[in-house]
Image (cartoon, coloured by chain):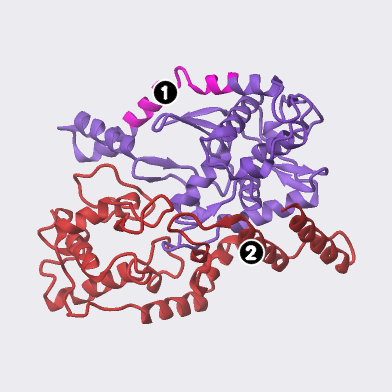
Amino acid sequence: MRMTKALALMALATLAGTPAWAQKSAAVQSIEEYRAMLQDGNPSELFEAKGEALWKQKRGPKNASLEQCDLGKGPGVFKGVFVELPRYFADTGRVQDMESRLLTCMETLQGFKAAEIAATPFGKGEQNNVTALATWLAAESRDMKLKLPQSHPQEKVFYEVGKRLFFQRGGPHDFSCASCHGQDNTRIRLQDLPNLTKNSGDGVGFAAWPAYRVSNGQMWGMQQRLNDCYRQQRFPYPGFGSDATIALATYLGVNSQGSASVAPAIKR
Amino acid sequence: MKKQHKITLSLLAAAAALAGCVAAPSSVDLDRLTADIVKKSFRDQGIVKVSVLDTDETNRVCSAADVAGKPLEADIAKKIEEANLKAVKWPSDGKFLGDWKEGEKLAQSGRGLTWTDEATTPNGGNCYNCHQITKAEISFGTIGPSLYNYGKLRGVTDPNAPAAKAIVEYTWGKLWNTRAYNACSNMPRFGHAGLLDEQQLKDLMALLLDPKSPVNQ
């Protein structure tokens, strides 16, 4: 928010003396230039390196690595798994996204308590490790096209539940996800909003997370992205890895099927 | 968690078995399952209680139409609008306009009622998040229509004149409860939901309708 304001002021300064009709496009243009500048050197690389090291490192009560973790394409396969999540896992009997599946592996292979990590706030303790792992795993699928499986009945059910969550109006402001993400070419203040009810294209929306956020210097996974959307929507707190967040991610991912994932991305 | 999930799964399996095949769950099943998942997934945090999700018929009907991808039937939309219009409270002293300067401050603020806000955080109007309002503020959203020259374009030269009565009342009603005029509008119901009080709404009214407001320059 502070960043938006600063940008607006920058844009305003640049604009002094330009005709009114040119303001909108020039303001948007300067934002785009700023975003292009950000692409040089994405700090997410630091999180990728940390994630890769964590994958191989023997840790936890069982002093084991995550190298036998099954993320959907068999134990130990880490290339290309990111673009096929969320998916149904027979061993847990659940549809899981990257982050909730990592918790499963950290519990079964390393002996951590998944529920404890899920209850840890973002940016604290093992949550930071989950984010780093998800960032590295996203990078291992960079530029691949999203192809979430929809063959298991539970995967289809989660898509349908996710759609209902997306359009759920509630809270004091009557907001739903669709209030901001249900139309083409709109913005909040100067921030462009993708239309998430359909395929929003390569590297947009679902295909851009995890991402490094310059405005607060934090690396965010999809779980934190959805969590903060719900916060701004004035909804109550969605549990980390809860079925609501996974169903919503399934809806967003399937809608973007075929688009290239650019994660880990960089955001304002 | 896992146990509850298995119960949900077996219910779905039972529903499928009753249907006599591996039929996909019906829309009603999915609505029920969604409600169940919402109940298990969300928790209270800070000032936000899960009870804020217990919403009213207006929202339920609009959400269902959105899921179906179809606009509301005209008669249902009309019923919702009538019910919401009935719930509009008009200014207790009959005065509609306050101070546009205070209105501008409210329009700028997007604070209040998130789980990172305090109970004492004053609610903003969030107006610039979605609308262009004054010409000076170039950081505005585009989800709602531009409100620049709102009063001027509607011919309001004296908000107290009888000629302005209809547009003044409509604007108050729209701010109090937007669903009275557009059943499934995206705009919050600022008065109806208690987001802003009567004086704050008057200040926003002045921002939009006072000929001296920068909106109408």
Question: In the visual, does A166 lie left or right of B23?
Answer: left
Tell me the shade of chain A: purple
Pick whichever, B64 or A232, lies toward us: A232
Crowd rating for badge 2 (residues with CA inside 10 Å; few <14, some 14–19, many 20+):
some
Q: Residues within 10 Å of mark 1 (few under 14, many from 20)?
A: some
Q: Residue A91 appears at what percent x and percent y? A: 82, 43
Q: Amino acid at mark 1?
A: Leu
* Residue B92 figure quarter: bottom left
* Image side of residue B161 versus residue B10, left or right: left
Q: Is residue A195 visible?
A: no
Q: Residue A81: image x %, image y %?
A: 72, 31
x and y percentages locating residue B64 in the rendered image: 58, 66
Q: Chain of mark 2?
A: B
Q: Secondary structure at mark 2?
A: helix
Q: In terms of image quadrants, where is residue A65?
A: top right
Q: Nearer the viewer, mark 2 or mark 1?
A: 2
Which is nearer the eye, A90 or B85? A90
Chain B's colour?
A: red
The disc at residue B35 is 2
SS majority, magenta? helix
**Pointer 1 indicates a residue of which chain?**
A
Q: Nearer the viewer, residue B88 or A133?
A: A133
CA gap, disc 2 and disc 1: 41 Å
How many tags in the picture? 2
Contact (CB < 8 A) between labels 2 and 1? Answer: no
Do we see residue A173 in this rendering?
A: yes
The percent position of residue A179, horizontal first and vertical second, equals: 46, 55
- Please state the extent of the stretch shown in magenta in the rendering: A29-49
Name the residue tied to disc 1: A38
Q: Is residue B98 above or below residue A108?
A: below
